[in-house]
Image: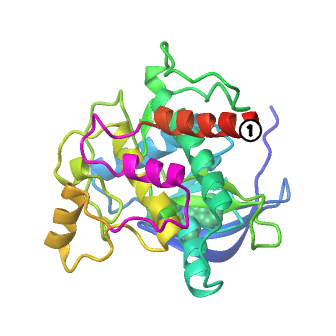
Amino acid sequence: KQFLQHKYQILEKIGSGSFGSVRKVLDLSTNTYLVRKEIKFSHMSIKERQQLINECKILSSLKHPNIVEFVTFDYKDGVVYIYMEYCDGGDLSHLIRDFREKYKKKMPEYLIWRILVQISLALWRCHYGLDYPHLNLIFDKVKKPESNNHDAIVIHRDIKPGNIFLTNIKDGYPFNEVMAKLGDFGLAKSLKSKNQFATTYVGTPYYMSPELLKDKPYSPLSDVWSLGCCIYEMCSLRPPFKGAKNFTDLENRIVAAVYEPVSDFYSKSLRNIIDRCITVDLRDRYSVMDILNDIQAKIMAKSLQ
Ligand code: ADP
Ligand code: MG
């Protein structure tokens, strides 16, 4: 048997994760850049260790062009190292910040659609356990697959701009060819698994759905709420519930979905998707299928013009 001895050259720190630093590394055997996420597990509870194994399992099972690719992992001296695809465009929170502070411009609508479509395709893969059948966006409306692979259904549970990674930014603005990839499945949960993990959320829950906030059962639709908040933030350059004065005020605004409408600089169809995602009643909230059907209808109308 021949094993490739992977040697990594450890490069600069590019972020800090909740359990250790995130670094860029060079895989010397393939000459490609990867990201190495460091997770110290020696002080972790059993639950947290289970969560870590869970993240590795979920990640390695999710292969999709819009999901950050898991490469391998190893561990040493109480630290697990997860190696994954390096996204050289950073995360979406940085892009939003740049539009607000550097370019001082609204994000162009096509760029928002681009990221919306790509993350919706990633979520389709997570929520239905299969790839979206119409990557070419043909004319038929899409139905939720009947025989989906239940073992593979995943709810991400922590969708926010900081967990949406970007590549192919080329020369930067106007980002015509940017690719968006969903990453950081640290809080993700497979629908089949029975063990509950601590869901203690660190940081301000700007993107958390009302049902998660109230400790009610969550569903794939909780991810759609958070996606709606990300799309809103691309349009408004601030998250929808940012204006809250304190935590209680924030909670109250979220459970009643009180937020300032998106500027009418953006199309009605985009604003409609945002509003239908940030909808409290689960019966009225869009699913990923609804989002992609809306987009298909839009493309169809355009091609018939
Ligand atoms: P945490 O679980 O602590 O949120 P993340 O996986 O979200 O950790 O990573 C933290 C930060 O590290 C990200 O916000 C990003 O800036 C950087 N980062 C993580 N993964 C990648 C990647 N694949 N490519 C580029 N940057 C990354
Ligand atoms: Mg993160």
The residue positioned 75% from the left and 70% from the top of the image is: 174
Residue at label 1?
305
Provide the secondary structure element on which disc 1 rests. Answer: loop
Q: Is residue 191 left or right of residue 233?
A: left
Q: Is residue 285 left or right of residue 9?
A: left
Return the residue found at the far top: 147
Quarter-wise, where is residue 155 in the image?
Answer: top left
Front residue of this view, candidates 75 and 18: 18
Q: Is residue 199 left or right of residue 135?
A: left
Amino acid found under the numbered disc labelled 1: Gln
Specify whether residue 170 is in view: yes
The residue positioned 46% from the left and 48% from the top of the image is: 273
Tell me if residue 262 is in the magenta stretch: yes
Q: Position of residue 29 (x, y in %)?
A: 84, 54
Front residue of this view, candidates 167 and 55: 167
- Point out the stretch of residues depicted in magenta: 260-286
Front residue of this view, candidates 120 and 190: 120
Tell me if residue 2 is in the magenta stretch: no
> Is the distance from the Cβ of mark 1 to the nearest ligand 1 atom less than 8 Å?
no
Q: Position of residue 109 (x, y in %)?
A: 63, 61
